[in-house]
Image (cartoon, rainbow, N blue to C red):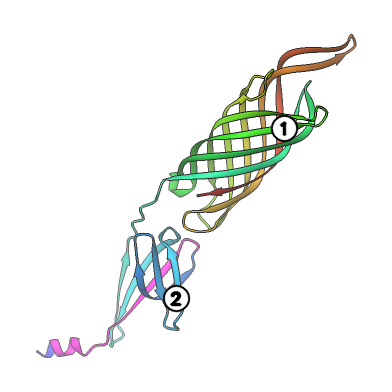
Amino acid sequence: MFFALHVCGQENIAQDKITLNTGEVYVGKIVVKTSDMIMLATKEGMRFQFQLLEIAKIESEISLQNNETEKTTDKILVLKSDFGGLVELTAGVSSAKYSFGWLPNTQLSLLFGRKNSFDGRLFLGAGVGYSSTFLTYKSSSVAFLPLFVRLQTSHTKKRTTPFVGMDTGYAFALNSGYAGGVLVKISLGIMHRISYKTSLIVGAYSGVQSFSGELIETNELGTFSYYGKTTMNNVGMKVGLVF
């Protein structure tokens, strides 16, 4: 009986400590916990909401009246959604030997794939796009339909992190008199996580793509027009939304 009264007489003060992936620490009481998020209320009355992907560790401490502390650590099991998408817009310039000089080029792409591979820092997916280069001297454009595979990796798991990406695939010509060819593109930039599922990417790219069409070559014998294969170089900027 004495032992029971002694235990009941102790005042238990429970505290939860949340450590984020960035190293930030928040102490208070967990008031809401779901499969996606946790809400913490501090003793000052402030409330903070975190997605589980942001959290590195949750610790619970119970302080007794005799100043003893009982400490437990929760292992976080996060059910990550591996499947995601990316919509992307690029704008730059293109040049193809014996075909045209540096001219405006744009591309709109849509990709789907796994976005949480390799500890949540790797996106591996496939995409389709519409690429168009405006031929100012013809007042027309030459367009391609690129089908490609993308490998994109982030440097860290922080909210804002550098990334590097590579596309490889084939671009189908959409204009008569042209034929498509293989493509390779490398990009780098910054990715900023907006929410649990969405991120914004901004960066630069450089790539090459082969195609066939009407070419014009000038040499010491004169100017010749013929149908042949050439390589188009592309450079520019890109912006995209991961979802």
Q: Is residue 218 left or right of residue 165?
A: right
Q: Which residue is mark 1?
A: 133
- Type of residue at label 2? Arg
Indicate which disc residue 193 carries.
none
Q: Position of residue 238 (x, y in %)?
A: 65, 44
Identify which residue is drawn at 35% across, 70% down.
32
Query: Which tag, 1 or 2, sits closer to the chain's start?
Result: 2
Q: Which residue is mark 2?
A: 47
Magenta stretch? 4-22
For the image, the number of numbered tags is 2
- Type of residue at label 1? Thr
Instruction: Say which quadrant the N terminus sits in.
Output: bottom left
Q: Position of residue 243 (x, y in %)?
A: 50, 49
Q: Residue furthest top?
A: 221
Q: Is residue 59 magenta?
A: no
- CA gap between label 1 and label 2 equals 51 Å
Q: Secondary structure at mark 2?
A: strand
Identify which residue is drawn at 41% across, 83% down.
43
Identify which residue is drawn at 35% across, 74% down.
31
Of residues 235 and 173, which is closer to you in this image?
173
The quadrant in which residue 224 appears is top right
Q: Position of residue 242 (x, y in %)?
A: 53, 48
